[in-house]
Image: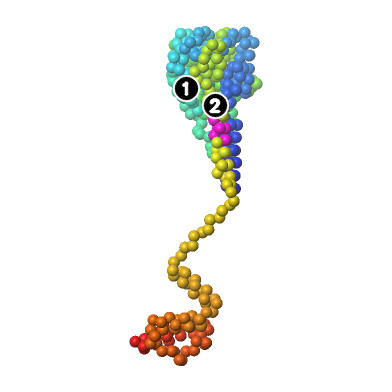
Amino acid sequence: MKKLGWLAALVAGICLLAILFAPRSGSAGPSSLSASKSGWAAARRYLELEACRSSSNGRPLSSAHLEGTLVIALPEDGLRETEDLAAMVRHVRAGGDILLAFSGERPRPGERFLFDSLGLKLQQVRGDPPLSPARWYRYVTAVWDLQAEEEPETVRPVRVHAPRWIPSARGSAQVLYRGPEKEPMVFLFRFGRGRVVVVPADALSNSRLSNPGNADLLESLRASLGPQLVFDEYTHGYSTPGVERGISPFPFDLLVAQLGLLYLLAVLALSWGFGATWKQTAPRTGSTASFLTGLASRHRQLKHFRRAAELLLSRVRQLDPSIPDPGDVHLERISDEKTFLEFARRVSSLKGAAR
């Protein structure tokens, strides 16, 4: 009963942790409409105050009319169709620019496919998280200061969360900022007649723009990307009125809550007592030898030596009435094992003499 109670508490705790750490659809990740710490609402507001015209794309790229710089911030909740990736490639080949912000986490299949479409490969720059709690905490809270490629002494560093995966820069790419091990973190390259600018999504998030270097990076991007920006919000949950979404975010937290409730009810049902407690009697097992040994031990404790001698003589005479009475052994003198053994040997010798 106690073990089942601990099991129920463990299952409830695991479900609670899963719900707490499950991604919330309300934050929308690095969306320009999100005011969470990972959102880009502050960056978009700053660009608008600096006379940049911004718009939110709430439909698939294959059916959208794209003008100016297309802003794509990862990770995304939705999935992209092949037609969307083809429309994005056509946009940049035709002379449009793309600001592509990578997540730095383990790439999802759609994110990897997106970078492959632009000729970029994702590479791991840090190993897997360690198992030690202290080392794991340092791993997940690590921060990198990105140094400018040109004039690093005067340009203020850009602060970002330490990534696990980054896109590798093409050979013709112009690197603007590098990581601690000289990893290209902010770079741009020509693609057709347009340009692709690659930055970490965390560099322009609401929680990072208070750092002077991150604000400098945003200002330099505003000056180079042009006055018109289109933020792709369709995969972050935003839809233009009249556009139906084919894919909705999976309710992971609700699924975990339902499974946890199911397990908890199962544990309670198994631990619930039905009627009075019934103890099953252990079956009696043993051999004939152990039974006889136990019986003899009992007679020895009660000192039944004389009675045993009488029974021995009586049983022997029932088998062979011709056996004479052992006159030299008196039954009243049999009081211990030694005298009983002597009496048994005497009876045995009489039996042999009678034959």
- Identify the secondary structure beneath mark 1: helix
> Disc 2 vs disc 1: which is toward the camera?
2
Q: CA distance from mark 2 to mark 1?
A: 19 Å
Q: Residue tagged by mark 1?
A: 110
Q: Could you say whether the residue bearing mark 2 is in a helix, strand or loop?
A: loop
**From this viewpoint, which residue is outermost toward the left?**
355
Asked whether residue 162 is in view, the answer is no
| Residue occupying the point 54% across, 76% down | 301
Q: Which residue is tagged 2?
A: 251
In the picture, the quarter occupied by the C terminus is bottom left
Colour mapping: rainbow
Q: Is residue 334 visible in the rendered structure shown here?
A: yes
**172 over 105 or under it: above or below:** above
Which kind of residue does numbered mark 2 sit on? Pro
Q: Nearer the viewer, residue 136 or 4?
A: 4
| Residue span colored magenta | 255-261
